[in-house]
Image (cartoon, grey):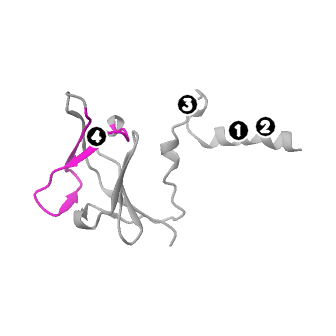
Amino acid sequence: MNRIAMLMLPLTLAGCTSSDVKTGHVDVSQMIFVPPVDVYETTHCIALQQVRSTRVIDRVGIAYEMPDRKIWLNRPQWGASLLQDDLVMVSQTTSNMLCSGDIVRFVDSSPAGIRASVALGPFISYSTAP
């Protein structure tokens, strides 16, 4: 019975995911944020002074963790395919808010300097367990 279950699981998962599974490439970063809620809270700006940490999700977006354990995920309007978690994020704003449409640049330690730029999209909230 266990052998049948082990054979059925990959087939079930393949039917629930993108065509990347069929090619043998599964982008794990796409599975990180699967909220258990039906309604999403969105905003166009977040306060920079409240951001506790950030995390770049390869080819997906940027997660901003807030003090109340809320995470704002930003899927850029353009440039998301250039995102890599080993790059350093540089945000330049003229206010204390980070907003949709702002440009965020990414650099590495090579002499080339700037490696990628993205235009932020709206922020979508996810709450973590208390």
Q: Amino acid at mark 2?
A: Leu
Q: Where residue 12 sits in the image (x, y, percent)?
A: 70, 42
Q: Where residue 69 sits in the image (x, y, percent)?
A: 42, 68
Instruction: Please name the residue that numbered disc 1 is placed on.
Output: 10
Residue at x-position 55% and y-position 37%: 18
Q: Where residue 58 sits in the image (x, y, percent)?
A: 41, 40
Would you say the residues marked 4 and 1 are in contact, meaning their CB atoms lie under 8 Å apart? no
Instruction: Please name the residue that numbered disc 2 is placed on.
Output: 7
Asked if the stretch drawn in magenta spans residue 112, the answer is no
- Marks 3 and 2, the one that precedes in the sequence: 2
Instruction: Please name the residue that numbered disc 4 is placed on.
Output: 78
Give the CA distance from mark 2 to mark 4: 39 Å
Q: Of helix, strand and loop, which one carries label 1?
A: helix
Give the CA distance from mark 4 to mark 3: 23 Å
- Marks 3 and 1, the one that precedes in the sequence: 1
Q: Of helix, strand and loop, which one carries label 2?
A: helix
Please tell me which residue lies in front, 52 or 10.
52
Q: Quadrant of the N terminus?
A: top right
Tell me which segment is drawn in magenta.
83-109
Q: Amino acid at mark 3?
A: His
Q: Quadrant of residue 122?
A: bottom left
Give the CA distance from mark 3 to mark 1: 13 Å
Q: Amino acid at mark 1?
A: Pro
